[in-house]
């Protein structure tokens, strides 16, 4: 009897080891697959344009060159200004948007809020239908008069129906008895929200904040619509997009005129701009990764 239990325990331990080995191997393989594209982009950005045409894309530069970065940083004042504009919009929009999303999600999950179902329906309705681009453009330029104003980039990203629903699901996991007991002690709704709800929703705040920050950091479409070239500094993504577009236009114009321009590193420039744009995000993400994972898993469970 003891021998059978011992053999059963050994088999259980062996099966656990096998599962862990396969699990670690699969996760390592998946992580490598996610890392390889970035390494390819990084290696290509330091490769001469002629080597890219001759050998294709490689993880290690065949002919090392920093010419693409020299062109991207040819105007350091514009680059630094674009970085600061994007950083300012990202930080401001993330702080305000996170606060608004948290308040909205908290209010919509409270059972003593009578209009929560109706408001939730209108929020969900916007995920299915929208007014379209033309009404949106007229609203921002004609009625709100935000043409050539950074608020035209800041305001549209403050609230997202998906993030509100996500926050609502997370806050629902917090017992409503906490709110009721705080009310009995004389705390107001805003005090309850600031001192009780927000500290308990740190994983959700980190997750939603990351989504909002990435949205602002990668935003270029609204910048292209509402920010003209009269502004000295425009967001980073639009600046990089215009840099690549200008280089592409120069090369195409030269080709149409039967003039060969080998000194325009278009392919390596694309990779260099990708590194410049994603570098800060990659450095920032590890600090919120643990909150991000917890916020996704807990917020997905209905309490």
Image: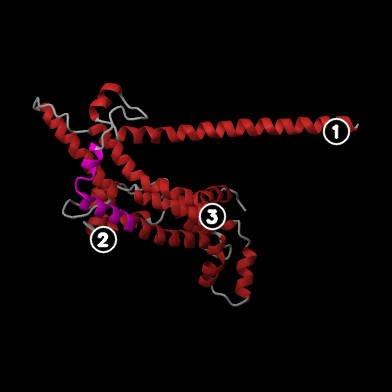
Query: Magenta residues: mostly which secondary structure?
Result: helix
Q: Name the residue under label 3.
A: 203
User: Which is nearer the eye, 195 or 167?
Assistant: 195
Whether residue 76 is situated above or below residue 13 in the rendered picture: below
Could you tell me which secondary element the residue under label 1 belongs to? Answer: helix
Distance between the alpha carbons at the discs numbered 1 and 3? 43 Å
Could you tell me which secondary element the residue under label 3 belongs to? Answer: helix
Label disc, if present, on residue 147 of the rendered structure: none
Magenta residues? Answer: 67-88
Query: Reading the chain from its start, which is encountered first: label 1 or label 2?
Result: 1
77 falls in the magenta region: yes
Q: Which residue is depicted at the point 63% across and 31% down?
A: 21
Left or right of 140? Residue 157 is right
Q: Position of residue 127 (x, y in %)?
A: 42, 47
Q: Residues within 10 Å of mark 2 (few under 14, many from 20)?
A: few
Q: Which residue is depicted at the point 37% across and 32% down?
A: 40
Q: How crowded is mark 3: few (under 14 residues within 10 Å), some or many (20 or more)?
A: many
Q: Residue furthest right?
A: 1
Whether residue 283 is situated above or below residue 56 in the rendered picture: below
Query: Reading the chain from its start, which is encountered first: label 3 or label 2?
Result: 2
Q: Position of residue 252 (x, y in %)?
A: 15, 30
Query: Reading the chain from its start, which is encountered first: label 1 or label 3?
Result: 1
Distance between the alpha carbons at the discs numbered 1 and 2? 76 Å
Left or right of 186? Residue 94 is left
Instruction: Tell me if label 3 and label 2 are in contact, CB under 8 Å.
Output: no
The answer, for residue 161, to whether it is visible in the render is no
């Amino acid at each position: 009897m003891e021998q059978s239990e011992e053999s059963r325990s050994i088999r259980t331990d062996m099966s656990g080891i096998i599962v862990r080995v396969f699990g670690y191997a699969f996760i390592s393989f998946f992580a490598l697959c996610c890392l390889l594209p970035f390494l390819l982009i990084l290696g290509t950005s330091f490769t001469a344009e002629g080597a890219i045409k001759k050998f294709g894309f490689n993880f290690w530069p065949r002919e090392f060159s920093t010419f693409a970065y020299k062109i991207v940083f040819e105007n350091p004042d514009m680059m630094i200004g674009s970085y600061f504009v994007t950083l300012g919009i990202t930080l401001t929009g993330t702080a305000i948007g996170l606060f608004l999303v948290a308040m909205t999600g908290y209010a919509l999950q409270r059972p003593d809020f009578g209009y929560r179902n109706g408001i939730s329906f209108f929020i969900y309705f916007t995920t299915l239908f929208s007014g379209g681009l033309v009404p949106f453009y007229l609203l921002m330029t004609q009625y709100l008069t935000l043409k050539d104003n950074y608020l035209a980039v800041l305001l549209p990203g403050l609230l997202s129906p998906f993030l509100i629903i996500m926050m609502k699901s997370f806050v629902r996991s917090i017992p409503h008895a906490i709110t009721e007991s705080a009310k009995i002690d004389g705390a107001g709704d805003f005090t309850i929200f600031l001192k009780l709800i927000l500290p308990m929703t740190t994983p959700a705040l980190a997750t939603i904040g990351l989504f909002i920050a990435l949205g602002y950091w990668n935003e270029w479409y609204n910048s292209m619509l509402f920010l003209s070239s009269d502004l000295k500094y425009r967001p980073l993504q639009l600046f990089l997009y215009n840099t690549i577009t200008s280089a592409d236009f120069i090369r195409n114009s030269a080709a149409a005129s039967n003039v060969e321009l080998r000194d325009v590193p278009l392919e390596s420039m694309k990779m260099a701009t990708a590194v410049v744009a994603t570098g800060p995000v990659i450095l920032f993400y590890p600090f919120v990764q643990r909150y991000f994972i917890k916020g996704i898993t807990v917020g997905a469970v209905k309490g």
